[in-house]
Amino acid sequence: MDDSRVYKMTFASVYPHYIAKAERKGRTKAEVDEIIYWLTGYDERALHRILEDKTNFEAFFAEAPNMNPKVSEIKGVICGYRVEEIEDPLMRNVRYLDKLVDELAKGKAMEKILRK
């Protein structure tokens, strides 16, 4: 993904793709939401507002109430990039979320996805 495009892309435009990816593999929207809450500190009400307001990814992560301190434990390759080596903070956060949803779709247990 072109880095400059992600700054303008709305979270609401990508969120349905996260859900569809999870559901194709027998996982649920609730699990995707739990991952988002864990990663960002948002709750259900805040996520609903973000989707309604068509908040872009830059604001989505910049305004996250509490980025989980365990994000540094998210490692591996997603979309051809090692997440731990991505220098741009926004792109790294986007790829962290991509990686977590990917782990969900691959059948990983929620406890492991949430680094418990």
Image (tube, rainbow, N blue to C red):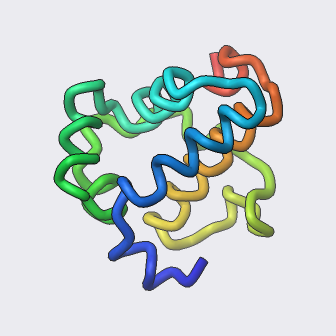
Q: Position of residue 99 (x, y in %)?
A: 67, 47
- The x, y position of residue 35, in whole percent, is 52, 30
In x, y percent, where is residue 56?
A: 30, 64
Which quadrant holds the C terminus? Answer: top right
In the image, taking residue 73 as reference, residue 31 lies left or right, namely: left
Q: Quadrant of residue 74?
A: top right
How many tags in the picture? 0
Q: Quadrant of the N terminus?
A: bottom right
Q: Is residue 63 above or below residue 33?
A: below
Q: Which residue is rendered at x = 74% and y = 65% of the image?
A: 79
Q: From the viewer's perspective, is 100 left or right of 94?
A: right
On screen, residue 61 versus residue 27, left or right, reads left
Frontmost residue, 116 versus 22 = 22
The residue located at (50%, 55%) in the rendering is 93
Residue 38 in picture, x, y percent from top left: 46, 27
For the point 79% across and 25% down, the residue is 108
* Quarter where residue 103 is shown: top right
Residue drawn where x is 44% and y is 73% of the image: 6
- Does 64 sit above or below residue 38? below
Which of 14 and 103 lies nearest the eye of the viewer? Answer: 14
